[in-house]
Structures are given as structure tokens and as C-alpha cells.
Image: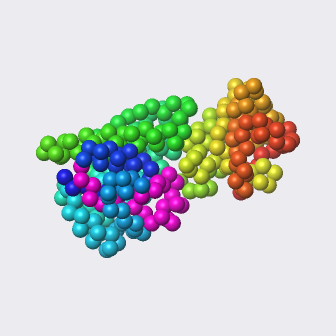
Amino acid sequence: MRIGWVGVHSEGIPALAAVCAAEYDVVGMLTLRRDKAERRCGSADYETICEDYDIPLHEVDNINDESSVTLLKSWNCDLLVVLGWGQILGPDVLNTARVGAVGAHASLLPHNRGSAPVNWAIIRGEQQTGNSLIWLSEGVDTGELIDQRAFPITPYDTCSTIYDEVAASNRDMLLDLCFRLEAGERPGEPQPHSDEDALPRRRPKDGLIDWNRRSKDIYNMVRALTRPYPGAFADLNGQTYHVWNTAMLPLPAAVALPGTVLGSVCCPDSSACGQLVATKDGAILLLEVEDKHGQVLRGRELSEQNWTARTRLRDAA
């Protein structure tokens, strides 16, 4: 079985490695041009793995343009695998593989169809998510379901740890699909009907922390947008800080005006040191922040900053 591969996000690497290790014939890899890929959160360099398995690697600007379609057709693929790719595929691309094109969406479709499903699931405080393998169509995440894998979202998970689960399930579902296709099956069934709207695309300004929200909401937002994403952010006395890690503390509601710096907290365990900020229903402990110059502050270094007690943290404009 001849397989073509398309991807730019790191979530596709374990699946590609497993398919190659199982001695399936991956005849070509198409990825985003490097200067564009570097601006994408979670992008990966596929050069090493392609060299390891002797896969021709091609960089493109637009998968739907004529040159990309011509390249894909030249591969004479049975199956086109598309993992971690931002563009919707046009019909010319979808028709380049004999059996079809498959992709994965990091949710239990049809729930959380649309943009940034992992981030939205954590922001909304959902306790479970998953990954869906589908036959790609011209719609947005509307193709026939091939397989699904569910996994919990614990209070300690971040976007990064959930994407580790996504990557592992990509690997497992793709291998299973390859086995079934070789056995003559073509699994797939229509998605259940859903009245949910597609998730909206997230914008950089959506990372602004609103201290008037509950501590739990802020905590979820920070862990949903932490690395490799741009991070949640706020403004302290005119300087913007990205907030990479926080902790919730059991304090009574309305201890101070939301956004007020209550002071530093330092424990024998330096990883639990930081700056305490008032929220709508109590306070949240900032454990790791980064200023606009790229200086990261965490632990004792963060707790020792001269952030005058009861200074107001302003929302960044």
C-alpha cells in the first residue's frame, strides 16, 4: 500500500514513525515551508524522520495550488494521511489517493468540531476529550468516522500533555486502519447529528487574563494556552507578562479587588513560590511568568520580585 503523508504539527511524528517501522511504503512527505512553519504553534521539523526512513520531503506554501496537487498525483497513493495541517483540503487534493484521504481531529466528533479543540476543551473545564480519525471531506471536520479514542482531562493536564495523548492515539488509530485496509476493509460511518456550532478560531488577544473571573477559570485558561502556544497574558504596571503556570489556593472570596497583587508566597518547595493575585472568588498563585524581553521568572526568583503588595494588575490592552 502506497501512502502519502502531509503534516506540520508534532502530533503526526509518532504515527509516521510507527507506520514506517511497520514497513508500509510512505512514498512522500509534504510539509509547510519552514519560515511559515516556524510561526505555527507546535510545528515540528520532519527532516530527520524523513531522512531516517528515506522519505522524499517537500515544502509547500499552499497544499491546494496546482504545483502541490501535481506533486501529490505523481505519488500514485492508495492512502493520503493528513495530520496537523491547518488548511481545508480542496477536492483536487482529496482525489489524489485511490482509497481516500484521512485525518484526525483532537476531539470526540461531532463534539468540539472546529478550531483549537484541545485548548477550548481545557478552557471550558471539560473532564474528557479524545481524538477522531475521519475520512476527509470538503466540510470542516464532517467526514465519516473511522475510529475514536477517548481520554480524561485531569486538573493537572495542559495543552501539551493532552497533545501527547493525541499523538499516541494518532499512531494507534493509523496503524489499525492500515491493517484493516490491507485486509480489504474500508471502515467508516457518518458522524452523529449535532446542533453544536463549530469552535471559533482563537486570536492572540483571546489570551488576555480577566481577573474578574473565577480562579478556576483563570487556571484553566493558563494551562490551555501554555507552551507551545503563545500563553495567557496580563499587564503589571505597564509591562506585559505571559503567564505560563499557576496554582489555585483555597482563599475566601472577595479578599481584595480582582487584579490586586496580594504579595509573594514562598514555600520550602521552591516550585510552589510565586506571586498571589486576587480574583473574583479568591486568589491565584502565579508560578511562572515571562516578560517582553524573554526573561522567565519562576520559583523563589519570582517570589522575590518587588511587586508591591496590593498593587493592581491591569489587564493588558
State whether residue 288 appears in this view.
yes
Q: How many marks?
A: 0
- In this view, the residue in front, 253 or 224, is 224
Quarter-of-image position of residue 155? top right
Left or right of 314, for residue 39: left
Q: Residue at x 80, y 34 (%)?
A: 264
Q: Is residue 69 above or below residue 122?
A: below
User: Is 32 part of what is drawn in magenta?
Assistant: yes
**Magenta stretch: includes residue 149:** no
- Where is residue 276, by image quadrant? top right
Q: Position of residue 85 (x, y in %)?
A: 40, 57
The residue at the far bottom in this view is 66
Residue visible at 50% across and 52% down? 42
Quadrant where the C terminus is found in the figure: bottom right
Residue 122 visible in the current orientation = no
Colouring mode (rainbow / by chain / secondary structure / one colour): rainbow
Query: Residue 213 placed where, x, y %?
Result: 66, 40
Please indicate whether residue 258 sits to the left or right of residue 11 in the image.
right
Q: Residue at x 48, y 55 (%)?
A: 43
Name the residue at 63% across, 48% down.
232
- Who is closer to the viewer here, 280 or 28? 28
Residue 9 vs 312, above or below: the answer is: below
Judging depth in this view, the residue of 7 and 106 nearest the camera is 7
- Judge left or right: residue 11 versus residue 214: left
Q: Which residues are magenta?
A: 24-47
Question: Along the line of sight, which residue is nearer the eye, 208 or 271?
Answer: 271
- Can you give x and y, in whole percent of width and height, for residue 212 in the image? 70, 41
Report the residue that reaches farthest toward the left. 184
Position above or below: 71 against 227: below
Q: Position of residue 165 (x, y in %)?
A: 43, 38
